[in-house]
Amino acid sequence: MHNISRRQFGKVAAASAALAGTGLPEFSFGQTDVRPGSANLAFPQGFVWGCATASYQIEGAATEDGRKPSIWDVFSHTPGKTNDGDTGDVADDSYHRYKEDTQLIKNLGAGAYRMSISWPRIFPDGNGQPNPLGIDHYKRVVDDLLANGITPYVTLFHWDLPAALEGGWQSRDTSKAYADYAGYVARQLSDRVKHFMTMNEFDSFTTLGYKTGKFAPGLMLPEAGVNQVRHNAILAHGLGVQAIRANAPAALVGLAENATVFVPVIEDEKNIEAARRATREENAPFLTAVMEGKYTESFLEREGADAPQVGAGDMQAIGSPIDFLGLNVYQPFYVRADGSAKGYELVPRQTSYPRMASPWIAVGPEVMYWAVRNVSDLWHPKVMYITENGCSADDVMTSDGRIEDTDRVMYLRNHLTHLHRAVAEGFPVKGYFLWSLLDNFEWADGYSKRFGIHYVDFKTEKRTPKLSAEWYREAIRRNVVV
Ligand code: GBH
């Protein structure tokens, strides 16, 4: 029995039981044993398990060591913009408590941590002279992670744009300032950090920041202006890739993108094709442009006079090859094939569709599989990571100090099950980062939505592992969906 795999064991045991006609086969529940005949949900050896956070959401210390305001400081301090007027002034105080947070990661047995760098700590005015105290802080954080056997994955921009940059993402100068900043950080950290992500989620900080006004800087521009902002954002990514390569030749460069994910309403050939087409078209201003180095004709046609102004060389920069693609995955959109020229139509969700505490998190764990598959089938990235996945829940502490977030465990377990399917089918997903390590400043929702697997008491900053942390530790320990 020792020389056969568990999967074979299941088959052999079932077969011999059937032959002998003795009813149930005998088996024991070992560390990773599964019932004969059930799927083995083990991940490959070396699969990267991690947690993710972002600077403005956890650090606090908003005015310390030379940091100047980001657009999120300005926005959150503007009355009416965030829930209860919450700001990131203190957040999780991780700027001071990063060693404690390292230990939380270590206790999970996680081998990786996706963190972001605060641009206004490094260049308080957005450009010009770097602030040495800024980069020194991140060297200490990274060294502490490394000393504890945790590999840092660094995002260079997770929405905290220096407020001093005039026009923000409306200006091409911001794209250039970003590239200088990215190159500087890569040069400073690449002796310690191998994986850099240029940006987090184009659509979130461009569309929400400059079209709906729900995120910083809270503008509601006409469509042409929004498209220019989107263009400047992907241009910054492209120039950033080039700057990182020039300054840190050994670094691996990627992106953390929340591509809109389409799930075929029924898994058959024509609907699978519809999901693929929808993925390409609906992500045209972002991931499609990055992966193809061009805007699709249908996007340019659709936007007409509102299409972005594209400078010479822009698309080539935007299409700079990347080493890995990170996907932030939360919710599915269902799609079916129709007879139209574009070949798909969205299938609306019924009002009874299940959701987590944040109303936008419609629960559909198969989103994980289709995120990977659609993107792979279209663009074949060599390496992919899930750079975020997780959910908010109405976490309350019991009288004996526990947080029984069975709903979050349910959400995570099912998403991992569908991620396993993608891995088992051979798609090159190398790791998974859970959002989030700890409850934090959830942007416009302030502290009203909790995404952590560690509970944070925002009065005392005390961290308490939730049931989901215990669950994640067990999954990591066994390298299997538990
Ligand atoms: C990620 O965004 C972010 O990277 C991370 O910082 C964040 O904390 C995490 O997810 C959880 O939200 O208010 O109706 O306009 C996920 C994508 C896009 C989801 C914007 C929320 C706002 C919906 N986000 N969206 S709405």
Image (cartoon, rainbow, N blue to C red):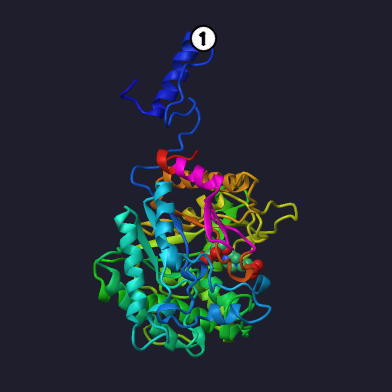
291 or 169: which is nearer to us? 169
Q: How many marks?
A: 1
Secondary structure at numbered mark 1: loop
Queried whether the magenta region covers residue 474, the answer comes back as: yes
- The image quadrant in which ligand 1 is located: bottom right
Q: Which residue is mark 1?
A: 22
Tell me which residue sits at (56%, 61%) in the image. Answer: 460
Counting from the top left corner in percent of width and height, residue 441 is at: 56, 67
Tell me which residue sits at (58%, 70%) in the image. Answer: 443
Residue 410 visible at all: yes
Counting from the top left corner in percent of width and height, residue 420 is at: 46, 44
On screen, residue 306 versus residue 422, left or right, reads right
Magenta-tinted stretch = 448-475
300 or 435: which is nearer to us? 435
Occupied quadrant, residue 194: bottom left
At label 1, the amino acid type is Thr
Residue 425 visible at all: no
Counting from the top left corner in percent of width and height, residue 370 is at: 52, 53
- Is residue 49 placed above or below 178 in the rendered structure? above
On screen, residue 456 versus residue 165, left or right, reads right
Occupied quadrant, residue 204: bottom right
- Is residue 7 placed above or below 292 in the rendered structure? above
On screen, residue 299 versus residue 250, left or right, reads right
Queried whether the magenta region covers residue 37, the answer comes back as: no
Image quarter where the N terminus lies is top left
323 or 134: which is nearer to us? 134
Q: Which residue is at the far bottom?
A: 166
